[in-house]
Amino acid sequence: MKILSAAVLAAALVATSPVQAQKLDLSTITCKQFIEYNKDSIGMILMWLTGYMADQDDPPVVDFDEMKSNAGKLGAYCAQNPTIGLMTAAEKIMGK
């Protein structure tokens, strides 16, 4: 019964996912496209970018204040540079 409940919950989460595509190639997304996504999709992308930009030796800690700060900086940069690729912008703003 627990397995069935977990499977139903997982299916419900996938069905209500705010990302429209099954795969999202962030290397092809422009800043303009990024800032046009809905809030939930932007949040998921930012969470992924935070992990991607982290050093391998960084502790496994999610700093929501830092992520919020980076989101504001990335949003402002993307608003001023809509044709720049998202990954290029993220490396400039979030890269170490």
Image (cartoon, grey):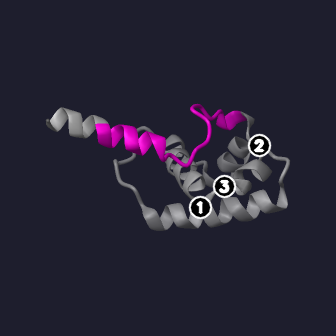
Image spot of residue 40 (x, y percent): 55, 56
Q: Which mark is residue 85?
A: 2
Label 1: state its secondary structure: helix
Sequence-earlier tag: 2 or 3: 2
- In whole angstroms, how far apart are the C-alphas of marks 2 and 1? 16 Å
Q: In this orientation, which residue lies closer to the viewer: 44 or 83?
A: 44
Q: Amino acid at mark 1?
A: Asn
- Residues marked 2 and 1 touching at CB (< 8 Å): no
Which dot, 2 or 3, sits closer to the camera? 2
Quarter of the figure with the N terminus:
top left
Image spot of residue 54 (x, y percent): 48, 45
- Residues marked 3 and 1 touching at CB (< 8 Å): yes
Q: Amino acid at mark 2?
A: Gly
Q: Which residue is mark 3?
A: 93
Residue at image position (60%, 54%) is 42
Vertical position of residue 9 compared to residue 82: above or below: above
- In whole angstroms, how far apart are the C-alphas of marks 3 and 1? 7 Å
Label 3: state its secondary structure: helix
Q: Which residues are magenta?
A: 8-27
Label 2: state its secondary structure: loop
Q: Quadrant of residue 53?
A: top right
